[in-house]
Amino acid sequence: MTPQLHDSQMYFTSGLALGAMVLTFMALSLVGRFIKQTIPLAVNLFICMIMGALVAGFGLPIRHLFEGPVWYIYINLVIFTGMIFLTCLKAAGNLDCIAYDILTKFRKRPAIMFCLITLLLFFPGMVTGVGTAGVLSTGLVAVVILRAVGVPNVQTGAIVAMLTTIGAAAPPVNLPAIIIASGINMPYEGFELILLVITVPLGLFTIFWLGYKHFKSPTLEEIEKVLPRPERKSAFMPYLPLLVVVAIFVLIRALPGKFPDIITPMVFMVGSLATLFTGKKYRFNEACKEAIRGGIFSTVALIFVVGAVVQVTTLTGSKGLLVLASLTVGAAAPVLLYVALGVSLPLLGGVLTHLGASVILGIPFTLAMLTQNVIAVVAGISMLCVLSQVIPPSALGGYFAQELVREKKYSSILTASMVPLLVCVAFSLVTLIFANKFAALFVPF
Amino acid sequence: MPPTYVIVMALYTALTAYILYLVISNMTRSKDVWEQIMAVFVIVPLFMRLIFIK
């Protein structure tokens, strides 16, 4: 008998690496507090990975630290170009025209208006996968509309925070699902319908729950007071860039082989260029630079670092250790696994952001549930992850929404969001528990 | 006329170069040291893509 068994050595090394990562994360967070600086999560996680690899005996794994991020170039280009498209729409005044049209045409039809606001707040999250993109772009427009129809400030903030958050899980781009799928070597295909089935009812429930009882039909004079009639070339022009983007997407799928698949980032760039001819004049290059600053830039940097996290945790065996822990919990009692999913993903995401939660816990939990339909499982877990965008301390979407509506305390917005938030968690868990039944109806394979 | 995939890949590379230019331009103007550090995480993979390392 050998004095040191291979498996115990394996557990020891991977446990040591995981411990080093966790300790480094905590130490850096404390250092950040001590020097009164918020160390960005991307920087923090990157240093954790270096420490984990060093402790596990892999030295400074430069190749692994930068090979992992390469797999996320495409999705980051989608986020960047999606944000450029939204910023160009805003700079050309097209978003103002759309908001004005929604307010004036549907001011006596709250149901249709709320559905359109849901679409408006979902759209940026759908094309970029980032909730804050929605708060920063169409969020401003939605706030004007909601205030004009009499929705109080706190509820308006809660609607913007929750809908942009849920929108980040809506198809076609759902970042936690993409991260989990690439983490378990699975193609990001077949998610469209099931993600729509999860997100659209939750989005509609949220806006109707928070806003419907406050709705008051405004007069045209009241509307013009809060949103002056925007300049436009013609009634149709503000919608042209959106139609161009939708038309190209439809043509690519309807005429495969005949219409060239110019890939999603190029479609958004074509849409962005179309805005140059549909509204006010603006400086395209400056708008593009503005688009990729701030919150979006931090998110993209974080996604690249997530690539390094996946690579290094796989290298050191830490990912396998977390998977084993999840499997053990699931084997002991399945109900514990679901409780752990419902509680830990949104709460841990509040510390690590939804992307951090998806890579660190989302992947192990998915691997622990491989007996169910994986697409439905990933969809449900991704929904739980995105909810962390309204959970403090990070609360990316929530804090931006609070700033937007100029509410003093975030706690009031969080309290108002509590019922929709719990409904979202419950519905996501139902999707996970009945994953095979959902998959039979809404997953193509 | 080159095949469609070659044109698409050329456009994709050109777009990567443009995004890289935007990121570097923002990084040089930024006064936030954290943003400059984070820019490295974005620039390195994009640069690797641009020179076809990956």
Image: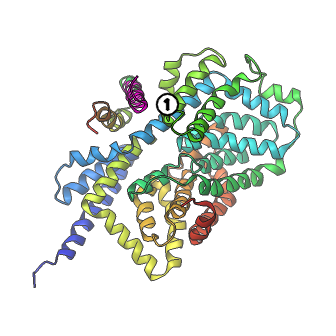
Residue matched to label 1? A266
Query: Residue at left 62%, top 60%?
Result: A442
Q: Is residue A152 visible?
A: no
Q: Amino acid at mark 1?
A: Met
Give the prevailing secondary structure in the magenta stretch.
helix
Q: Nearer the viewer, residue A100 or A249?
A: A249
Furthest-bottom residue in this view: A1
Q: Is residue A83 magenta?
A: no
Question: The N terminus of chain A is located in which quarter?
Answer: bottom left
Q: Nearer the viewer, residue A52 or B8?
A: B8
Q: Position of residue A251 (x, y in %)?
A: 59, 36
Furthest-left residue in this view: A2
Q: Is residue A186 left or right of residue A204?
A: left
The quadrant in which residue A140 appears is: top right
Q: Is residue B7 magenta?
A: yes
How many numbered dots are placed on residues in this image? 1
Mark 1 belongs to chain: A
Furthest-top residue in this view: A281
Above/below status of A220 relative to A174: above
Above/below status of A55 relative to A407: below
Query: Residue at left 58%, top 16%?
Result: A282
Check disc 1 and report its element: helix, strand or loop: helix
The quadrant in which residue A276 appears is: top right
Near mark 1 (Cα within 10 A), the count class, few <14, some 14-19 or many ≥20, is many
Q: Position of residue A292 (x, y in %)?
A: 47, 31
Above/below status of A259 relative to A163: above
Q: Position of residue A138 (x, y in %)?
A: 65, 35
Report the magenta residues as a range. B1-24
Q: Is residue B7 left or right of residue A109?
A: left
